Image (spheres, rainbow, N blue to C red):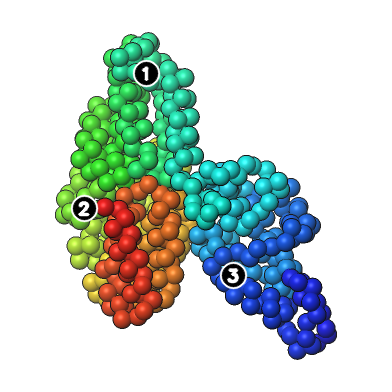
């Protein structure tokens, strides 16, 4: 070996030092698994980093950061940096190699975690950035930026003349363009729901659903009526879904019932099936799986020949989950096979626009849930559950934050079931923190339910400590 200098401090390395770092610098970096190092200002002048910042692609910035010579002869592993950012190694790989992210909340948070100088960024990172650390080490409430976003969506819908105050609804003639704008506003709300959860969103969406319902009293041509009623049904479905996610089960039932009536009135059987699916998901969450099965089978029978492949796959996947929970493993696997067959036939151009959320990640998540329930009851299939959930996490897009967190909870459970408690605790610790940034009662409930799968590992100190973390999290939700 030849003498060299430590890239971190410039000190001379011993001839037998093959780490690329001097002993003091290695000691200073002992905690790199939990937090990024404090780097000098010159760190950001490295040409690959400057080029990535100029290209406005945070994934490439992270890659250049990992490969910086400051870290030694070997780049930082993706798994280490992913841990800093609160995501998985597979997700970080997609972020580094995929299209540039546009979600300001995530850009601001990750740039803050890595301590990127604000002057080098193409976006503002203020003290109120959602989830960002303040000077005192605490975190700004993630709701602040999201409430501003919701206010903007409400302003868009009001400016388009879609909603008004109850005492002054500003009735006018409704046209086809109004229905198109109504559906566009719903898509904006759905995108926020995927990323933030329904707790923050419910009141806004419920107010919007109630407002658009009054549009039925406004003048419109008979040709517009079916599309308008279907849009109202979709608004009610979203209001019910966000109520469910917020833990407001009575409100969810009320909105689902109103949406179902509207969908049937519009003769939109696929939309009615989506609402039945939403009702079944609520029943599954409350562990009423017999009722969930009855609801899903009713949806199938009402669809008839109007069922599309994606809707069939959605319903059969949910039915498989309830069958597995009830111990009917053979039927559950058969239903998953039917769901997979239908998924392969999906043509996005021929599916309803509101089915855009259903992708391979959703299908794989159902596989993970079925195998996980089978593992709890039979002691096998846990390894398959881990594999399916890991594939689901990779398949979900970066905007679908809640689904990824829910599946990381599932991964934690599956790892406990496979007898890998250390890995399970590492994943579980991450999702406990992630759950704080989501306004989703469903996510919190799933996180707290991890206590049932860790029981046989309680004798391990790391598991006992994690259980105490879950108990504290439960107390904080009361």
- Callout 1: SS: loop
Single out the residue that lies furthest toward the front. 136
Q: Position of residue 376 (x, y in %)?
A: 26, 71
Tell me where residue 253 sits by quadrant: top left
Residue closest to the eye, 3 or 312: 3
Residue 48 in view (yes/no): no
Residue closest to the eye, 287 or 447: 447
- Of the numbered discs 2 and 1, the one sitting upstream in the chain is 1
Give the alpha-carbon distance from disc 2 to disc 1, as whole Å.
36 Å
Q: Nearer the viewer, mark 3 or mark 2?
A: 3
- Left or right: where does residue 446 sit relative to residue 71? left
Which residue bears the numbered disc 3?
32
Which residue bears the numbered disc 2?
286
For the N terminus, which image quadrant?
bottom right
Looking at the image, do the residues carrying marks 2 and 1 touch, with CB atoms under 8 Å apart?
no
Give the alpha-carbon distance from disc 3 to disc 1, as whole Å.
53 Å
Tell me the crowding category of disc 1: few under 14, some 14 to 19, or many 20 or more residues within 10 angstroms, Cα based: some
Image height check: is 175 above or below 200?
above
- Left or right: where does residue 155 sit relative to residue 287? right
Residue at the image position 24 percent from the left and 66 percent from the top: 329
Which residue bears the numbered disc 1?
164
Residue at the image position 74 percent from the left and 85 percent from the top: 17
- Callout 3: SS: loop
Residue 319 in view (yes/no): yes
Q: Nearer the viewer, mark 2 or mark 1?
A: 1
Tell me where residue 259 sits by quadrant: top left
């Amino acid at each position: 070996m030849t003498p060299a200098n430590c890239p971190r401090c410039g000190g001379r390395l011993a001839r037998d030092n093959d780490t690329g770092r001097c002993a003091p610098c290695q000691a200073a970096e002992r905690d790199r698994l939990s937090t990024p190092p404090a780097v000098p200002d010159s760190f950001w002048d490295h040409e690959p980093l400057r080029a990535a910042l100029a290209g406005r692609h945070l994934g490439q910035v992270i890659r250049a950061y990992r490969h910086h010579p400051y870290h030694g002869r070997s780049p930082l592993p993706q798994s280490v940096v992913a841990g800093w950012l609160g995501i998985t190694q597979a997700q970080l790989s997609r972020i580094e190699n995929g299209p540039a992210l546009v979600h300001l909340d995530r850009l601001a948070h990750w740039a803050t975690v890595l301590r990127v100088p604000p002057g080098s960024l193409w976006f503002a990172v203020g003290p109120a950035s959602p989830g960002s650390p303040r000077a005192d080490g605490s975190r700004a409430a993630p709701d602040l930026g999201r409430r501003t976003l919701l206010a903007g969506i409400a302003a868009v819908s009001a400016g388009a003349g879609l909603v008004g105050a109850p005492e002054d609804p500003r009735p006018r003639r409704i046209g086809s363009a109004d229905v198109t704008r109504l559906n566009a506003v719903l898509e904006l709300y759905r995108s926020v729901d995927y990323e933030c959860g329904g707790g923050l969103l419910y009141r806004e969406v419920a107010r919007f659903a109630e407002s658009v319902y009054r549009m039925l009293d406004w003048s419109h041509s008979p040709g517009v009526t079916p599309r308008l009623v279907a849009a109202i049904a979709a608004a009610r479905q979203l209001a019910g879904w966000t109520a469910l996610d917020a833990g407001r089960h009575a409100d969810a039932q009320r909105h689902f019932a109103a949406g179902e009536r509207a969908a049937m009135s519009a003769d939109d059987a696929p939309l009615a099936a989506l609402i039945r699916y939403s009702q079944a998901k609520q029943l599954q969450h409350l562990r009423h799986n017999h009722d969930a099965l009855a609801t899903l089978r009713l949806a199938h029978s009402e669809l008839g020949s109007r069922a599309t492949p994606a809707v069939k796959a959605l319903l059969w996947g949910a039915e498989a989950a309830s069958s597995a929970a009830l111990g009917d493993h053979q039927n559950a696997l058969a239903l998953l096979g039917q769901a997979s067959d239908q998924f392969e036939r999906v043509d996005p151009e021929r599916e309803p626009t509101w089915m855009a959320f259903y992708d391979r990640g959703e299908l794989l998540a159902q596989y993970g849930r079925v195998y996980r329930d089978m593992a709890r009851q039979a002691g096998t299939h846990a390894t398959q559950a881990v594999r399916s959930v890991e594939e689901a996490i990779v398949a979900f897009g970066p905007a679908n934050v809640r689904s990824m967190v829910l599946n990381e909870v599932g991964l934690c459970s599956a790892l406990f079931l496979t007898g890998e408690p250390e890995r399970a605790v590492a994943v579980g610790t991450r999702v406990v923190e992630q759950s704080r940034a989501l306004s989703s009662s469903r996510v919190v409930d799933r996180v707290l339910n991890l206590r049932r799968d860790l029981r046989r590992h309680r004798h391990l100190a790391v598991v006992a400590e994690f259980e105490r973390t879950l108990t504290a999290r439960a107390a904080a939700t009361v």
